[in-house]
Every structure is written in C-alpha cells, then in structure tokens.
Amino acid sequence: MESRRPAATLLASLAWCAACIAAIVVVMGPLSVPAIRLSISDPTRPSAVAALLLIAAIALRRSLAGLLDDLSRSVVPYAATLVLAGALMAALLGVRGATNVGGADSAGYLLQARRWLHGQVRQPLPLVVPGLPGAWPQSTLGTRPDPHGTGTVPTYPPGLPWLEALALAAGGEALAVRGLPLAAALAALLGLWALARPRVGPAGAAFAVVTLASLPTFLYQALQPMSDVPALAGWIVALALAGRRSGAALAGASIATLVTILVRPNLAPLALPVAWQAWTSSSPRRPAARALAIGASTIAAVVIVALVQWRLYGSPTQSGYGSASELFALSNVASNLRLYPGWILESCGAATVLALVAGLAWWSVQAVRQPQARPPIAMALLTLVLYLVYAPFDSWSYLRFILVPLAILPVGAGALLATREDCRAPRWRFPVFAVAVLVVVLPNLVQARRLTVFSVRQREFRYQAAGEFVRSQLPATAIVVATQHSASAAYYGQRPVVRADLLTPDAFAALVNWARAARRPIAFVLDEAEPAMLRQRFGEQGPAALDWPPRAEVGRPVATRVWVDEDREPYRAGGRVRTTRITGP
C-alpha cells in the first residue's frame, strides 16, 4: 500500500492539471500550441482525462479520504500547479505574445539596444531642414535630443537595452523580443515560489504564483518586450535569495539587485528591503557583512546609472525622462490614490481583490510578530509610496508600476488559506486550494480577455508591417512623418522620421516645402485616430488633408495607413492610387 501512495498522488495531481486546462478552455475558448501540435477546442476531452486519472488515483490508493490526506501532506500537487502555470505562460507567449517591436516603449528599447550593440548610442540628426526647430521633432519615441541639440540619445535606462543587446548578439531579434519576456515571466513566478514557500508552505506559495500569473496587467506586460516584468522578477528573486544563508544565494541577490536597478533606477530604494532581508536571515555573527554586500551592489548600480546619464544627458542626476522634480511630486498622491484602486477593480476579479486585502492584513500582523516578514511587506509598501508620488497616467495598464506589491500581497492570502484548513480540517487543504485557485484565476482570465490582453500579437503586428512596407516599397530618400509609429518606423523602416506631434504649423510647412524642393517623398504613417489630429493641427489644406488614398493599409484590430504625398497631385488630376492591404498574423 505504501508503495502505491506516491503514484496515486501523482495521478491525482495530473488530474488536477487536466481539470485546470478544461476550465481554462471553458472560459477562454480553444487552446492551441502549434509548436507542439496541441489543439484543445472542446473541454470535454481534458475533463474526461481528469476524471479517468482521478478514478485511477482513487483505485490505486483504495480510499478517497486517504488520497485527500496524501494530497494535503504532499508538495506534489502544488509543485504541479507551479509547473502548469509556467507551461501555460510559455504557451501563451508562444501563441499570443508579440513577435516584433511595437509602440513607443518596446521599439524604443530595441532601438536603444541596437545603438549600444553597434557603439552608436548618440546618433546625429538625419535631416538638416531650415525652419525645423531644434532636435525634438527628429527625436522618435524613446529618444531625446543630446545636450548639444545636434543628435539624439536614448530615453530609457540602460539595463533592459543592455540585456536585449546581448540577446540580439546571441540569437537575433527573436531572442530579444520573445525569449527575454518569457525568461523574465518564468523568473518572476519561480522567484515568488522561492520567496513564499519557506514562509507559507507549498499551498500558499502556489496560490500566490497562480494569482500573479493570472493578473491581466502581469499578462499584458509579459506578452511584450517591456521592462516591468523583468524589474518585478529582479526584485522578487533578489528578496528570495537574500533570505537564504548561503554565499551563492547572497551573490545572486547582489547581482539581481544590481541588474534590476539598471533596468528601473527609480526603484533603487527597494534595495533597502533586500539588504534588510539579508541582515535578518544571517547568522548572528555576520549580519552587517551580508547587508553590506547588497549595499555594495546598489552603489555600483547607482554609479553606473549616473555615469550613463552624465554621458547621455550632461548630468549624472538627469534621467532621460527629465528631472526628478518633473516626475515626482506630492501633488500626485491624491490622483494616484484614486487611480490605482480603480484600476484594480477594473482589471481584477472580485476574488483577487479580496485576496489582496486579506494578504495585506496578514502581512501587517506578521510584520509585528515576525522580523522575517518585515522586508517583503516593506518592499511592497515602499513601491506603493514611490509610485504614489509619481506622475499619474490614464490607463489600467499602468498597474504595471505596482507589480511588486501585486505579487507579494497574495502570499498572505495563501497563508490564510493554508492555515485555516490546517487548523480545522487538514484533509480538505488541497480541495479548498483547488477551489480558491479556480475562483481567482478564471475571473482574472475573463477580465484579461475583455481588456484585449490576448490581442497583443495582432495589435503590435501593425508596427512591423507598416515599417517594413516603408523600407521595401519607398525610396531611400523618403521621410516618415509619424507619432505613435515614430520609433517602430525608424526601427523597421530605416528612414528619417519626423514627429508630427512635435511640429508647429510653420515647421510642418517648412518640412513640406524643403522635401518638395529636394524631391524627397513624405510618407505619413498614422494610426486610425491620428489623421484627424493631423488635420486639426496643420489645417485642411496641403498634404495634411490626406485627401487621397493610402499606399498601404494594415487591418484590424487597429488600422494603420501609409500615405505618400507625391500621390496627391496625380490623384487629384484623375489618377489612381493602388492600396496594398496587409492582413495581420
């Protein structure tokens, strides 16, 4: 009988995984992973597999009560939940994740990575146009004028672009765009497991992991090459490793701290909870040495950031986003106190909101009782403080700024879940865990679908399609006028770009006249809402009217069109303009 128990536990854990897949198919629709030729469109098949596996487990154990006891005592079902979450995350990124750089941030990061890789961080202005004011109009999204106003430099901190430059050198754009986001997402999930399991056990840790993995804001950022999930992964991994006593773990925590500060320098104060964790986790004779190791890596990262900023912006305290006084202000607190709770309610299911509140209560109580609990809740609260004074934004997706507390707080909810069942009915720990997971995860996935999180690949495709059309179909002398597409058009189109949103009417007229005299065509690369803004800004006369058919149109979910000004007069004279229709992936 004893020899059968591990096998029965494994079969029951696999049944749980199959049941999860069936539930996801019910709420999300067909699950397809072409890379391994897996397609599940009907939930009855995984449901049947789950039922058969469960029956086999009960038969092998010869007792349902005994099987429940084994599941509650074993780490296997919770580890299986972790593996399933990672596998589904990898599958989701493979099927729905971006395959190209897109809007301002993702294209800006890759542009910067390419500049660092080729040793051309500062690039001279590609156009010299009389009447074009300064370097700002030629600064694409993700870049800004250098201190002399004769070239452009990157806006973003160096950490993620350096990682992407390594990926570009090792495996090309695919590794940078798809590999790094996957690695960061998996590191965040594994790091949270490592942080939570010693504190709340495998059930609580698994609950925290799946809660994070199902958050719409986490999924949205994980599906594209952005810095938010790498920053989350870095801080969670650093905190988890700082809680272990080995020298290797301390070295890992120090490296993670250094890299993460390079990725997101404004969160450098989060190194304090990491150092605090290293201090409280050390032997009585070496607390200061461990904390100093974290401090040394923090100082090294801050010095590197300061040197980069000095080189690019002329001052070690000047970031690419502007001065600290422009970004941080106490006057922002009231707006952010209203926005962040509203975004949580907008994007998360009710059970997740309850888990966050319960988790905050648990961490608060534990911080009074247990010194080891203080660094994690300090990191969560410090993150909130740093972003409460940060400039407010207008979209639920900016919950990405507070991913650290959104990851840490559910650990407390998982602890309450596990502790309650341990005290009252240990046998029911796993069934209660399973119900709690489904109650949290499924509504979150429904919300993510409603918020079009899973349309990232389709939505981002337009940036690559429009840029590659410019590169392949327009002459090398073409000039691109764009706003949202300014970074991606520079990345894929490899043509000079002028920002429409940074031009005055006089500057626009000067650009048009100069380009006409130089016989250089102007390509307007605009999303569906931008032509109206162009007409409002520059009037209904001349090329800004866009009163001729575009050369190219990229389809839904967001339409992008490419107009070429040299088509206007022939069309007005009775000619035709052939529009190339480009469909998404």
Image (tube, rainbow, N blue to C red):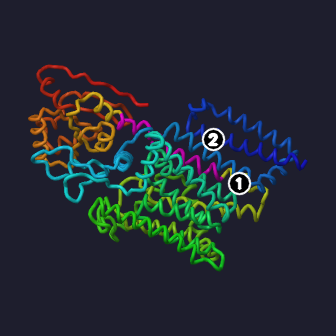
Q: Is residue 318 left or right of residue 85?
A: left
Q: Secondary structure at mark 2?
A: helix
Amino acid type, label 2:
Ala
Q: Residue furthest bottom?
A: 285
* Residue 99, horizontal then vertical, whole percent: 44, 38
Q: Is residue 292 above or below residue 264?
A: below
**Number of residues whose C-alpha sits closer than 10 Å to that of mark 1, classed few (under 14), some (14–19) or many (20 or more):** some
Residue situated in front as seen by the camera: 97 or 119: 119
Q: Is residue 325 above or below residue 368?
A: above
* Residue 186, horizontal then vertical, whole percent: 57, 50
* Residue 264, horizontal then vertical, whole percent: 42, 60
The residue pinned by badge 1 equals 432
Amino acid type, label 1:
Val
The image quarter in which residue 244 lies: bottom right
Q: Residue furthest right?
A: 1
Q: Is residue 463 left or right of residue 209?
A: left
The image quarter in which residue 4 lies: top right
Q: Earlier in the sequence, mark 2 or mark 1?
A: 2
Magenta-span inclusion, residue 137: no
The image quarter in which residue 468 lies: top left
Asked if one can make out residue 255 in the rendered structure from this viewpoint, the answer is yes
The residue at 57%/75% (across/down) is 289
Please identify the quadrant where the C terminus is shown. top left
The residue pinned by badge 2 equals 23
Q: Is residue 312 above or below residue 439?
A: below
The residue at 50%/48% (across/down) is 219
Residue situated in front as seen by the camera: 493 or 297: 297
- Mark 2–mark 1 distance (CA, rounded to whole Å): 16 Å
The magenta segment = 436-464
For the residues labelled 2 and 1, say whether their Cβ atoms are less than 8 Å apart: no
